[in-house]
């Protein structure tokens, strides 16, 4: 299973659309994972073969796919 397929499977788990707050939390998780990866790669001796770098990159890709693909809740008040 590749990352795109994994992300699609995770997105399918969302029975309800994501609220703005949930999307914000995913966006923040992406930001923090990317920041941590950046800080780690500055000190990492072998970013290409490093399991920490690779895991962070995979997490960012999966979270980004969820953020992009999951349905969004309509949070506008009913008129």
Image (cartoon, rainbow, N blue to C red):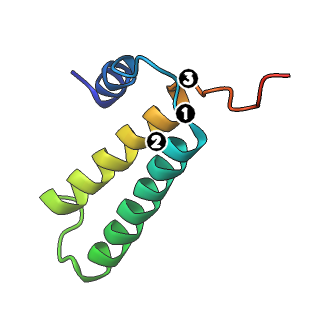
Query: How far apart in space, not on screen, are marks 2 and 3 (Cα)?
Result: 13 Å
- At x 46%, y 41%, the residue is 64
Up the image or down, 35 lies above or below 56; here it is: below
- x and y percent of residue 29 in the render? 40, 56
SS of the residue under disc 3: loop
Q: Give above or below for 32 relative to 57.
A: below
> If you read the primary sequence from the N terminus, does the residue marked by circle 2 or circle 3 appear first?
2
Q: Residue at label 1? A: 68
Sort mark 2 into few (<14), some (14-19) or many (20+) by Cα contacts within 10 Å.
Answer: some
Left or right: 49 with respect to 43?
Answer: left
Residue 57: in sight, yes or no? yes
Marks 1/2 in contact by CB < 8 Å: the verdict is yes
Which image quadrant: the N terminus? top left
Assign the C terminus to one quadrant of the image.
top right
In the rendered image of this protein, does residue 52 appear above or below residue 35?
A: above
Residue 64 got which mark? Answer: 2
Residue at 32% x, 52% y: name it: 57
């Amino acid at each position: 299973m590749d990352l795109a397929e994994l992300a699609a499977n995770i997105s399918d788990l969302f029975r309800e659309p994501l609220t703005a707050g949930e999307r914000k939390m995913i966006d923040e998780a992406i930001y923090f994972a990317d920041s941590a990866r950046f800080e780690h790669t500055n000190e990492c001796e072998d970013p290409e073969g490093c399991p920490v770098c690779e895991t962070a990159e995979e997490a960012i890709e999966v979270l980004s796919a969820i953020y992009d693909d999951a349905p969004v809740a309509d949070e506008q008040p009913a008129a």
